Amino acid sequence: MLDLKALIVYYTRTGQTKVVAETIRAILQCDVEELADTQKRSGLFGYMRAGRQTMKKELTVLKPLAKDPSQYDVVVVGTPVWVYNLSVPVRTYLEQNKDKIKKLAIFCTHGGKESFGAAFQSAEEITGLLAIAKLNLRTKEVKRAEHVEKTTAFVRKVEEGMAKA
């Protein structure tokens, strides 16, 4: 394994994105930070608010973060897909830290077949970086613990992307 300093930053509403983040952390042996939104996202109203804010590309207020992304060689960003795009907390994080991210990798969890493309594109547009690795996982793959093989391949791409310093 390469000697790289990686940070995983993710948001989860239902816990599926956290499962993937923890799998990546276990393989990379790196730091991890969960984004905490100050807005309530649970329940029907939280779900509806999240969808509306996502469509409008609104930002939110995140609770203070402990990790500075400028101190890492790569930031691995994890997001659930909301209305075919980045979750509001992840969009906010990327907007606030876009100038601090040296290299980007991104993964997402989603319920649909092809509902993730705009999430990847948005992350790259916000940061101005091409992701060195991308991973999309359907929620059912994560719930059935069928994500490990794809996640391991994703980590290998992250490592290869870092080797191309």
Image (cartoon, rainbow, N blue to C red):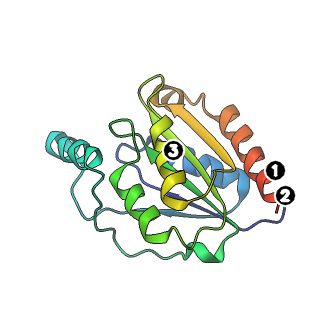
Q: Residue at x 51, y 44 (%)?
A: 121
Residue 43: x percent and y percent? Answer: 19, 42
Q: Amino acid type of disc 1? A: Glu
Give the alpha-carbon distance from disc 3 to disc 1, as whole Å.
21 Å
Residue that label 1 marks: 160
Looking at the image, residue 37 lies above or below residue 100: above
Give the alpha-carbon distance from disc 2 to disc 1, as whole Å.
5 Å
Give the alpha-carbon distance from disc 2 to disc 3, as whole Å.
23 Å
Label 2: state its secondary structure.
Answer: helix
- Left or right: 53 as drawn, with respect to 149: left
Residue that label 3 marks: 121
Q: Amino acid type of disc 2? A: Ala
Tell me which numbered mark, 3 or 1, is placed earlier along the sequence: 3
Residue 101: x percent and y percent? Answer: 59, 68
Q: Are marks 2 and 1 in contact (CB under 8 Å)?
A: yes
Mark 3 residue crowding within 10 angstroms, few (<14) / some (14–19) / many (20+): some
Q: Quadrant of residue 2?
A: bottom right
Q: Residue at x 42, y 54 (%)?
A: 11
Q: Are marks 3 and 1 in contact (CB under 8 Å)?
A: no
Residue that label 2 marks: 163
Nearer the observer, 92 or 121: 121
Looking at the image, residue 35 lies above or below residue 115: below
- Left or right: 12 as drawn, with respect to 130: left
Nearer to us: label 3 or label 1: 3
Nearer the observer, 129 or 35: 129
Q: Quadrant of residue 14?
A: top left
- Left or right: 147 as drawn, with respect to 94: right
Q: Residue at x 21, y 56 (%)?
A: 40
